[in-house]
Image: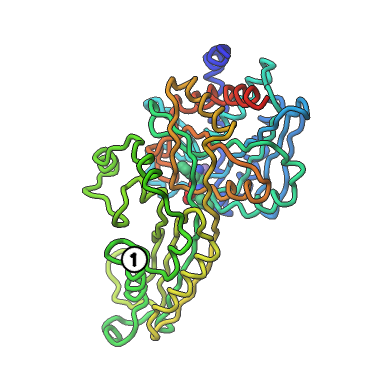
Amino acid sequence: MAKINEYIEANKERFLSELFELLRIPSVSADPKYKDDVFRTADSIKASLTKAGADKAEICLTAGYPIVYAEKMIDPKLPTVLVYGHYDVQPADPLELWTSGPFEPVIKDGKIYARGACDDKGQMFSHVKAFEFMMKTNSLPCNIKFMIEGEEEIGSDNLGIFVKNNKEKLKADVILVSDTGIIANDIPSITVGLRGLTYLEVEVTGPNRDLHSGLYGGAVPNPINILCEMIAKLKDDNKHITIPGFYDDVEVLSAEERAEMAKAPFSLDEYKKSLDLKDVIGEEGYTTNERNSIRPTLDVNGIWGGYQGEGAKTVIASKAFAKISMRLVPYQNSDKTFEQFKNYFESIAPSSVTVKVTPHHGGEAAVTPSNSIAYKAASKAMETTFGKKPIPVRSGGSIPIVAMFKSELGLDTVLLGFGLDSDAIHSPNEHYGVFNYLKGIETIPYFFQYYAEMSK
Ligand code: BES
Ligand code: MN
Ligand code: MN
């Protein structure tokens, strides 16, 4: 497939400008203010898939944002690859920390800066361009289906329903996703594990109104103080989570598996330096790479209450709030973990306050096989284009639909991602290397070629 490099060379500028068009649409699924833009993004992807050569491309409406579905069936006897990706993005704030507009893509030092550049518009669009290449050169070796959703960043609830209701339509042999990363541009890797998630919100109420902190201070429960004390009780001195039953179902890796994991190249010094950290912390007895992949965690993602304006206001707030998430590992269950958290949190609340715990979204962890034909095809494809065999690694991030692909469709997923941890996904100044974008376009057709050959 020497032609792919020529094709990329000849079309590079267009590949970039088409991606820029997509990046200019602020498809923030979390904020209703962007509703029209999110819908517009779905239309734009449908049009790109049609133009690239799909027989059928459609907008599938849901109770939330639409799912773009497309297919090119060449022969029912050949295997079918279902490509999944998402066109929605995380909110861009805090805006003042961006060096250029989040929806005004620019290339600086070989990197495309924009919200969604890496997660997931850039990675998803490399599939559209790889498909275009295979259609143009008549080299698509098997059937292909696309399912691109607009609610990944808010939990994929409607996609879950769509998958359950469209099993026939989504019939395939394997799922292919580019929404993860590699270790470094010269150290390719394939993600073989994702963590699950339980996300919730807590509200602690003290007095029935905000109070003068001099007249009442010391004599009444301050919900902010109490919320902080309660949060502090969620972990012990060894950073072990104290919620009863939390670890009951946690997958235990063997010493051999952990030794294998430890072989992946990693420098703690560089890790600290890249984050301007003096030190790392985490669960006693585990390495940094274990803490952020094979072990569950609990983090406060937001906390508020009381006076936040200019200057000082002497006040005791009536209420305090926090958003808390737990990353889960195989065999833990998102709903069960929510119940365990709720019971424990309510049990540690002093009788002077009332506590409300409300679930947000969740999802289960997934481990994908590293001995399947599809994995081997992905590995060989990366070896061809990077010149090095990729290392299987377990990631700490979550893509909730991956576990459902297995449970609902019985399908394994290959996580053929091209991002880097340093791409600042979900952060200000998200970016994606032009190298990575084009490497995706180059690698994907090899995956199809090898997968079709190996499936024979
Ligand atoms: N693409 C990411 C997940 C990811 C990134 C996995 C890098 C592995 C490596 C995805 O868009 C994401 O951000 N998922 C959310 C979960 C969702 C339910 C909000 C996450 O992990 O926080
Ligand atoms: Mn993503
Ligand atoms: Mn994301």
Q: Is residue 156 above or below residue 311?
A: above
In this rendering, would 159 be left or right of 329?
A: right
Q: Please provide percent x and percent y for residue 456.
A: 68, 24
Q: Is mark 1 within 8 Å of ligand 1?
A: no
Q: Please provide percent x and percent y for residue 425.
A: 44, 42
Residue 442 visible: yes
Say which quarter of the image contains residue 175. Answer: top right
In this rendering, would 288 be left or right of 250?
A: left
In this rendering, would 133 be left or right of 421?
A: right
Q: Quadrant of the N terminus?
A: top right
At x 43%, y 20%, the residue is: 387
At x 59%, y 30%, the residue is: 127
Q: Which residue is mark 1?
A: 235
Q: Please provide percent x and percent y for residue 334.
A: 53, 60
Q: Please provide percent x and percent y for residue 335.
A: 55, 64
Label 1: element kind: loop
Q: Is residue 339 above or below residue 91?
A: below
At x 32%, y 51%, the residue is: 286
**Mark 1 belongs to which amino acid?**
Lys
Front-most of residues 46 and 337: 337
Q: Residue farthest to the left?
A: 278
How many callouts does the rendering have?
1
At x 45%, y 36%, the residue is: 392
Q: Is residue 9 above or below residue 132?
A: above
